[in-house]
Image: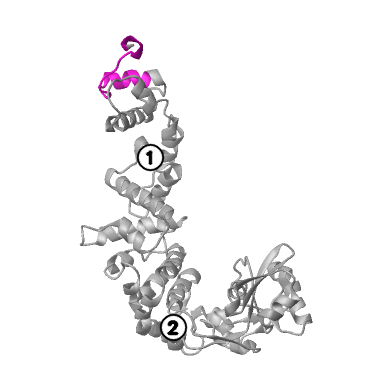
């Protein structure tokens, strides 16, 4: 890697922002993850900008700004229909809660600002001409494929314990090794993770599960015992071990969580494992929990029965059913992707709402009071339609329900009047 890069793409588009800051008499650089990803030839979707200008000075330079984190030196600048987060160089004090600095001090030194960052690969800066500033040899570590804490790893992890999860996540995403002292320090400080909000841990763990080199992240978590301080994972070492395979790829986060649930249940000695409780402890959204459980129970059905039938596929929906076929291929079973697609495409209806009969129709045909029998009758009718035992027509369905004794009493309402 050379000491200069070509400023193009999103960096080139952002140069006017840095230039305005520089013209006002301050320093400004591209820093952090955007620089790291560019040097690794990865896609860069946004840039991080650091400056010697104080927040109030940035607000004087630009007419449209938003205080998104001004107490930590960050101002959002709106410029040419784009938004840019600009952060003042800063140093940080002690971290009593292992999450947030007790105080932040703004400085005018780029080197001091880079020194507070987590890993050397994230402590690289680039100016508007493409010249690289790398006081902590981050470029060398990028070339070696190494994740190394800036300075003393104990200090970095005691400042923000989430950095340990970020280290194992980066290992999984980048196919990097965690440097020996940094890895040892994760093991010695693993218990500090209990001070971190579950939501923040969840983001890192989910990214790890979705990563191409998941095995490296999981192995680092197991080796350091970091997994013991994640929600509900302390006794799930065997399940995590079983996930150490880079041949498994997940297209959606819900698929990754569903596969983890399946592995946990398979390797668990506790027969009372509650997947919903597990996901709630991880603070997943209700929608993500629902989608994950749909995949999880669908996967269990698929494994037990060797295939998904039309009723399974109707209830799962096309995407989930095909997703399950992708998952089952990692469990030494042949994927029946084409069969599932063919069955789905030939379903007579795709939603419960498409059934040509509803509860009101049933009530018009019987003298019995509303009750559970209505939902049971509709469920039977729906299943019969899905299996093409009867056409999706109101009279055909009613006649079938009557023949099958699925409704308590059928009559002609007019004859009762």
Q: Mark 2 points at which residue?
A: 157
Left or right: residue 27 compared with residue 163: right
Q: Position of residue 112 (x, y in %)?
A: 59, 89
Report which quarter residue 38 is drawn in: bottom right
Q: Where is residue 84 in the image (x, y as percent from the top left)?
A: 66, 70
Q: Where is residue 196 in the image (x, y as percent from the top left)?
A: 41, 75
Q: Where is residue 315 in the image (x, y as percent from the top left)?
A: 38, 40
Q: Mark 1 points at which residue?
A: 315
Scheme by which the image is coloured: one colour
- Vertical position of residue 359 compared to residue 117: above or below: above
Q: Do the residues labelled 1 and 2 touch (CB within 8 Å)?
A: no
Residue at mark 1 to residue at mark 2: CA–CA distance:
46 Å
- Vertical position of residue 170 compared to residue 158: above or below: above
Magenta range: 396-416
| Secondary structure beneath label 2 | helix
| Secondary structure beneath label 1 | helix
**Residue 262 visible in the displayed image:** no
The residue most toward the front is 417
């Amino acid at each position: 890697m050379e000491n200069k890069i070509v400023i193009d793409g999103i960096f080139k588009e952002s140069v006017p922002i840095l230039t305005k800051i520089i013209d006002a008499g301050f320093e400004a650089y591209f820093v952090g993850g955007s620089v790291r990803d560019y040097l690794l030839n990865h896609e860069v979707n946004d840039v991080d900008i650091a400056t010697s200008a104080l927040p109030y000075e940035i607000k004087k330079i630009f007419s449209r700004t938003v205080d998104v984190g001004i107490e930590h030196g960050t101002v959002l600048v709106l410029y040419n229909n784009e938004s840019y987060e600009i952060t003042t160089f800063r140093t940080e004090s002690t971290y009593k809660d292992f999450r947030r600095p007790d105080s932040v001090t703004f400085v005018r030194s780029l080197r001091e600002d880079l020194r507070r960052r987590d890993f050397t690969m994230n402590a690289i800066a680039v100016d508007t001409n493409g010249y690289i500033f790398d006081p902590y040899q981050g470029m060398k570590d990028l070339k070696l494929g190494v994740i190394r804490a800036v300075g003393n790893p104990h200090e970095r992890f005691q400042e923000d314990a989430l950095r340990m999860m970020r280290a194992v996540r980066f290992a999984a995403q980048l196919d990097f090794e965690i440097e020996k002292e940094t890895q040892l320090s994760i093991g010695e400080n693993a218990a500090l993770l209990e001070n971190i909000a579950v939501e923040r841990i969840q983001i890192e763990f989910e990214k790890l599960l979705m990563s191409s080199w998941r095995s490296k992240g999981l192995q680092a978590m197991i080796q350091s015992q970091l997994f013991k301080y994640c929600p509900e994972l302390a006794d799930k070492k065997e399940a995590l071990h079983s996930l150490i395979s880079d041949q498994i790829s997940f297209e959606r986060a819900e698929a990754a969580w569903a596969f983890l649930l399946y592995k946990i249940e398979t390797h668990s000695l506790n027969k009372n494992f509650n997947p919903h409780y597990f996901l709630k402890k991880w603070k997943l959204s209700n929608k993500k929990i629902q989608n994950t459980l749909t995949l999880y129970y669908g996967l269990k059905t698929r494994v037990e029965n060797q295939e998904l039938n039309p009723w399974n596929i109707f209830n799962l929906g096309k995407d989930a059913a095909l997703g399950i076929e992708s998952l089952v291929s990692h469990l030494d079973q042949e994927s029946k992707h084409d069969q599932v697609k063919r069955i789905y495409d030939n379903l007579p209806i795709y939603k419960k709402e498409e059934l040509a009969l509803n509860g009101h129709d049933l009530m018009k045909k019987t003298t019995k009071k509303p009750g559970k029998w209505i939902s049971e009758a509709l469920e039977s009718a729906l299943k019969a339609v899905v299996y093409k035992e009867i056409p999706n027509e109101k009279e055909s369905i009613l006649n079938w329900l009557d023949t099958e004794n699925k409704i308590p009493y059928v009559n002609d309402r007019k004859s009762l009047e």
